[in-house]
Amino acid sequence: MKKKTLKSGLGLDIGQTSVKLLELEQSRGSVHIRDCRVLDIQSEGILDDEEMYGSIAAMVKDAKWNDTPLCLGLPQFMATTQVCDFAPGVKGEELDKMVHYETVQLAGLSEDTFLHGYQPMQPAYGRVNPVLLGISRELSVNEYCDKLKGAKVNLRDVAMAGLGVANTFYYLHPEQLEEQTPQLLMDVGCENSTVLVVAGGEVLYVGSMMFGSQNFTRVLANQMGCSQEEAEKVKRGMDPDWESATDPMVIASRQLDNELKSTMEQWRGGEKEELANEMIAKVWISGGGAALKGFTEHISRNYGCPVELLAPKWKEGPAPELCIAFGLALQAMGMSVYDLSLAPASVRWKIKKEDRFPCLVIAAALFFATTIAGMVYLRIWCKEQCERYDEKMIELNKCKNLIPELDEAQGKLAYFQRMLIPIVENGRRGGRILEGMEELRRAMQPGEWCIYVGDEFSYKGHEVKKEEIKTEEPRRHARESRMFMPQAEASEKKNDSSEAELKTVLVDEMPLLKALVVGGYTPRQQKTTRFAAVLNIQNTLKAGEVFSDQVDWLADTDKNGYELIVQEPWKRFLANNKATLGEFNDFWLKIPYKKTDVTLPMKSELDKGGKRRGKGADKAEQDGKGKPSGV
């Protein structure tokens, strides 16, 4: 669980023979040890946990650390760590679910519940999405934390001792975050040791060994024939001969060699091929056992690699025994590289509440301040709105008096617009027909010609009865001009036309020029289909700017027989000259325009206009001497 950075923090490392309680303080961008208390369990004569935790409570009270955030170190043998590699791109809630599933797998068939924590790492060494996972039995962690309740400390987190070593290592040596070769961190405690393999800022392995500095004490006591207390005093002041095979320190270190060899084999067995065969580039030793004289040189000779002491500085020199406590304090402050937490749910909830309490206070203050400000603003706003609405009402009353005048003007405007419809429509028909003929000229190929081009009104005006198609009379009338008609017949035609002129067409219902009717001939080609040329004309007209894409053959329902009269002389002409001209295919097309120059008002608009035109329309018609709206 990621925490905010604090100015100070405590690290509590409870070992087999001593308790280390270390306070770190941050100032001017750096961290230093402000105070440290070490409780020697053996020398103080502490016999049980109750006395030990009572002494811890006394230390906390004496140093006034009750409110300082504390991170408790969990012995490494009480936890299990593993580096898991998940699918690339998995993160957030999906990663939480996968980690939970992996925790269940690691717990196996155990009926106990487990706490787990994890931290994603950067892809490297053959892993695409590595995650460092730690688990521990919930019951063991709760018991460990419950013992601290009497000490009245501000417990903020629980972390593994091994990761405390890693955090100390990367804080004291930040340049090692970029070192890609594997390195070994070994914290030698009293009864056991913690081992880590790190590389490139990532923790690759965390394990525990059943070897500690107490092994040296027991071997020395056996050889000297004295108690372990006396042997411990001798050990602290002796200078072992590490090159002698009979030296008790050398004899005891053989178990360390075996344990370390087994640990390294275990790490290599689960590591990716990229690092499985890599040699350890350097060994870092910490813990109380690291203070033994010549021990680092002995490890260096045995493993053939540099060995260096990992220890924070305290008082006059390095203190390797404070390595774990230092890393735990870093995690309590939120400054650790690895903040993997195994804190129980009660501790996590407590911390969450404490962290959110300032936000709650700020939110409450903002709520009341916003409420008061909102009420004041609402009163001012309501007053302004009332004044505005009063002004609007005055304006609306003025507008209400103007509505009849607007209705009258709109009625007049609609009336005169409707009167313009026949002028615009009839005045543009000749130009539109010429545009259509020019478009036809571009669409037709050499050898193709039209025998008839007319608007749909002209075509429909020549409707021929079916019984007249079989006689010669309609054709004669079609060919003859009116100027050659007999006087009586011409007069009769004139009278008929006069009667037609008296026919009234409403402006709103007058027909608009929407299409042309075209008839013609195309040469018959042997290698193409009969209507290929006509199809080409249709496609060319559709692609133009004048006619729509509805260009098609003249439907049988639209034909009135006049096309047969127009074609008859041409059929005879082509039949008589077939030997010289060749064969031709006739066609009749209906060619709609893309748009009209006039848009007639809809019925709904007419109804609406009829209701509102009232005075304006009536007055306009009176000015027009009562003429109806028609042509």
Image (cartoon, helix red, strand yellow):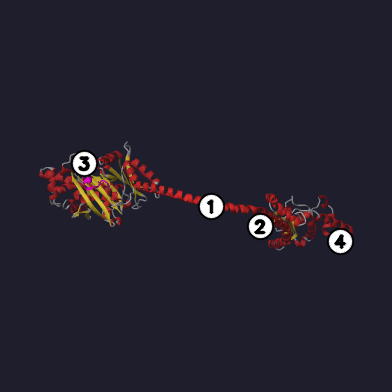
Circle 2: residue type: Lys
Q: Which quarter of the rendered picture does the C terminus lie within?
A: bottom right
Q: Is residue 600 left or right of residue 461?
A: left
Determine which of the numbered discs, if any, sits on residue 8 in the image: none
Circle 4: residue type: Phe
Q: Is residue 576 left or right of residue 382?
A: right
Q: Which residues are magenta?
A: 58-67
Q: Which residue is mark 4?
A: 484
Q: Earlier in the sequence, mark 4 or mark 1?
A: 1
Q: Residue 528: within the magenta?
A: no
Query: What SS does tag 1 mark?
Result: helix
Q: Is residue 274 left or right of residue 250?
A: right
Give the alpha-carbon distance from disc 1 to disc 2, as whole Å: 62 Å
Of tags 4 and 2, the one toward the viewer is: 4
- Residue 286 in percent (x, y) is at 22, 51
**Cβ–Cβ below 8 Å for labels 1 and 2?**
no
Q: Which residue is mark 2?
A: 542
